[in-house]
Amino acid sequence: MDASTPSKRAAAPDRLRALWPLIAGLIRPRRHLLAVGFVLMVVNRLSGLVLPASTKFLIDDIIGHQRHDLLGPLVLAVVLATAVQGATSFTLTQVLSKAAQRLIAELRRTVQAHIGRLPVSYYDANKSGAMVSRIMTDVEGVRNLLGTGLVEFLGGLLTAVFALGILLRISPLLTGVALAFVLAFSLVLRRSFRTVRPIFRTRGKITAEVTGRLTESLSGVRVVKGYHAEAREAAVFAGGVQRLLDNVLQSLTVIAGMSLSGTLFMGAVGAVVMYVGAREIFAGALTLGGFVTFTAFLAFLVAPIFQVVSIGTQLSEALAGLERTREVLRERPEEADPRRTVAISTLRGDVAFDRVRFAYEGGKEVLDEVSFRAAPGTVTALVGPSGAGKSTIIGLVAAFHAPTTGMVRVDGVDLATVQLGAYRTQLGVVLQETFLFDGTIRENVGFARPDASDAQILDACRIARVDEFAERCAQGYDTLVGERGVRLSGGQRQRVSIARALLADPRILILDEATSSLDSESEALIQDGLAHLMRGRTTFVIAHRLSTIRRAEQILVIEEGRIAERGTHEALLAARGRYFELYTRQHGLETSLFLDAGDGDSGVEREPSTAAKPPTDPGDTIRLIHD
Ligand code: ADP
């Protein structure tokens, strides 16, 4: 930990300055509440001083001068003051702690909503576990800003000022001695904080990293187990936990050091005050009551210094968390692009790529001068080897990314200038990794259109053949699908996601056909659903199935980010070029381009060989190509 490097020291006020707009933004709407809190606190602290202040009076006047008549009123005053102190303490905690929790809730909502509006590239660059940390943990720091922490600290300071006044009145000499110690101790604390602050900052980072990796390995449990990598994952996690432990231990050492110096300081002050105080009493410069009161008030002077220890660490943590929150909030949402001014109400679904080049952030170029046009209602099939750029092209159609140069046009409008909300509501996406969340079948389908009626949902389910399995479940459409839909089969998940897209009724449809093999019956049902889904929509499909490819108005053969060939199935075969090569290479083997209904390489459900000529039956949905 390079805690003491000058650059980090210098950074502290800058950090606070940078954070100030965020903090001020959070505090401003609550300034009245804070003002009330502050008044309550002043009353609280003043009433808390009544008991110690009455000691001198009790000893020197009531006991010293035998004033029996004043004893009752004094006790009553003390009781009343304590009641006020209790009541204000209670109200303070109620008001401020609850306000702080509300603020945390508000900030969580803000951060989550903001992250939701960030472009896909942000998600590519950040682990989901780390984003969870941003939303759930980092914002907790504000509790210490608005909650009792800061107010108590201010209260402590205020009490210290009162106490200092009283101490000076009782004995300037004793006060001077005590103050010298307090100042020396403050310097020690300042130093300690400089050491501990960067440790806290690192802790947040480590926690986010460890949580991130943990989330990944838990959600990828099948892969972890499949590769028997439990021990490796455990080792990675153990390493992370160790780093976290080292960090905590390091900070504990510093905190224990602070605590030690605190105790030593108290002892030293106690001893000196005892010595000087007793000599003052001998000399007649101080009364016994005055001395007792002095020691009581000394505690009020010293207490805030100790509060600095706890509040200061809390504030350090809070600031570190808020810094990360601020980083996220400063990321620019997709919609914030000032060029996005065109509101498309109803899409025709005319999509054109005009000399599109594209590179992922910090990566090499993956698309090179891609130009094509997809007329409304047509199917464009993208084929080609893996890594060629097919997903990148559909990502550009979905406006997940924007071209580096060139243009994607939708209905003749540059997609980079189109408002995303309206555009994406007319976009349907069915991906290989169908995204289902842990809810019912009905909820997963309805996800596409929260306002859809039950009849509309059931209709979509019928067309996508979800009814065929949903109605066989005991709970019907209210069957829970499990996290990511684990309780459904691959084919059932795909059908749910087709039903979802049907319900959305998009103008532009993006399909990433599953490469995984299904039994021929599921396959036929899915093909049926897909055929319905594509009808009348501009469809882009990363195609693996011959039936889909043959249905396409145009096939784009993508290779190394370029369109190597284009045309219809028949035309491309006749041209005997790259497509023909890819096509004939299928030759009864494990295939990545054209799949049959059965297992790619096991031959299950394969049609008998049809020699070099392609299958011609247009109703034939699923065939593997053989020579
Ligand atoms: P395909 O869909 O044809 O398999 P992709 O479009 O997924 O190909 O990938 C094209 C190229 O872009 C590949 O080299 C791949 O490594 C790269 N790529 C894909 N996604 C990203 C990403 N999010 N960040 C950086 N590079 C990426």
Image: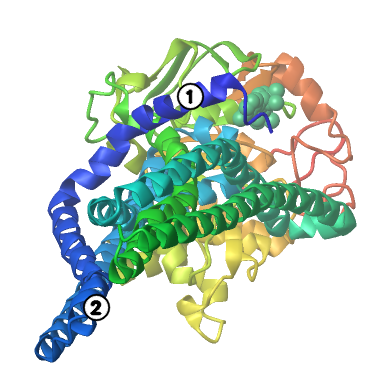
Q: Earlier in the sequence, mark 1 or mark 2?
A: 1
Task: Name the side, left or right, on which 2 lies relative to 176.
Answer: right
Asked which quadrant contains residue 559, the reply is top right
Task: Name the side, left or right, on which 487 lies relative to 246.
Answer: left
Foreground: 167 or 409?
A: 167
Asked which quadrant contains residue 285, the reply is bottom left
Q: Position of residue 470 (x, y in %)?
A: 53, 75
Foreground: 444 or 550?
A: 444
Residue at 70%, 50% (x, y): give it.
244
Foreground: 347 or 187?
A: 187
Which residue is the site of mark 2? 86
Foreground: 62 or 386?
A: 62
Q: Residue lying farthest front? A: 283
Residue at 47%, 45% (x, y): give it.
181
Ligand 1 falls in quadrant: top right
Task: Name the side, left or right, on which 430 lies relative to 210.
Answer: left
The residue type indicated by label 1 comes to: Ala
Q: Position of residue 34 (x, y in %)?
A: 19, 54
Task: Name the side, left or right, on which 379 lies relative to 589.
Answer: left
Eye-nearest disc, 1 or 2: 2
Which residue is the site of mark 1? 11
Q: Is residue 94 above or below residue 475?
A: above
Give the spatial CA distance, label 1 vs label 2: 41 Å
Residue at 31%, 37% (x, y): give it.
22
Q: Position of residue 152 (x, y in %)?
A: 32, 58
The residue type indicated by label 2 comes to: Gly
